[in-house]
Amino acid sequence: GEDVEQSLFLSVREGDSSVINCTYTDSSSTYLYWYKQEPGAGLQLLTYIFSNMDMKQDQRLTVLLNKKDKHLSLRIADTQTGDSAIYFCAVTSGYALNFGKGTSLLVTP
Amino acid sequence: EAQVTQNPRYLITVTGKKLTVTCSQNMNHEYMSWYRQDPGLGLRQIYYSMNVEVTDKGDVPEGYKVSRKEKRNFPLILESPSPNQTSLYFCASSMDSSGNTIYFGEGSWLTVV
């Protein structure tokens, strides 16, 4: 599949903002997703953005899409310890959903 | 409630013993797929199905089979499991292949010893 790249780790203090970045190679991707996975659990869809949008906000979550640079980011405002998890970026590519390797977010008190 | 249900959720099995992981969705979705998740590799697609009796290989199909005899079910078959198939498996379904509103099952932890 096409490449989806994410940084592997991010550590933030409780109350700060977290920004998780993702780059992808398939310019035809129509839907771009962010999933959250807590330890031992399945995938939880956090939010998604359609490729003709630049930004989407949903409560504490803001997704920014730079289609020219093929760059997607997820900003979590006022990060809480409960936000500690692995976050996956995923983009549609043909009949598949291509995932990044996941960013482990650690929120420290 | 919209659901994708996988079974078993946890399984330890031995090399070579055939097993099937079932997947069922209650949303009348046409498109279903299987992924495996491995540490440091993210999720990779194994097989997908666009409709009944229509299946095709994803990125990592070796060692797996699937079938789609009914719209709601998409079982994953490991004819002769090997230790490198130890993984976390996810089934997913959606109305079509565009990627809109994909639903994932809760995952099946499979260990092959």
Image: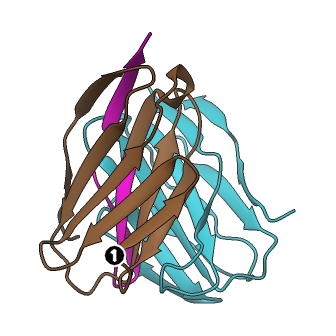
Extreme-top residue of the structure: A109
Chain in cyan colour: B
Quadrant of residue A72 within the rendered picture = bottom left
Q: Residue at 19%, 41% (x, y): give it.
A: A7
- For disc 1, the marked residue is A54
Relative horizontal placement of residue B44, taking residue A48 as reference (left or right): left
Where residue A6 appears, x then y in whole percent?
A: 21, 48
Pick whichever, B7 or B77, lies toward us: B7
Q: Colour of chain A?
A: brown
- The overriding secondary structure of the stretch rendered in magenta is strand
Is residue A94 on the magenta stretch? yes
Residue name at image x 64 percent, y 79 percent: B68
* Residue at 75% in and 68% down: B25
Q: Is residue B40 left or right of residue B69?
A: left
Residue at screen point 73% across, 83% down = B71
Q: How is the image coloured?
A: by chain
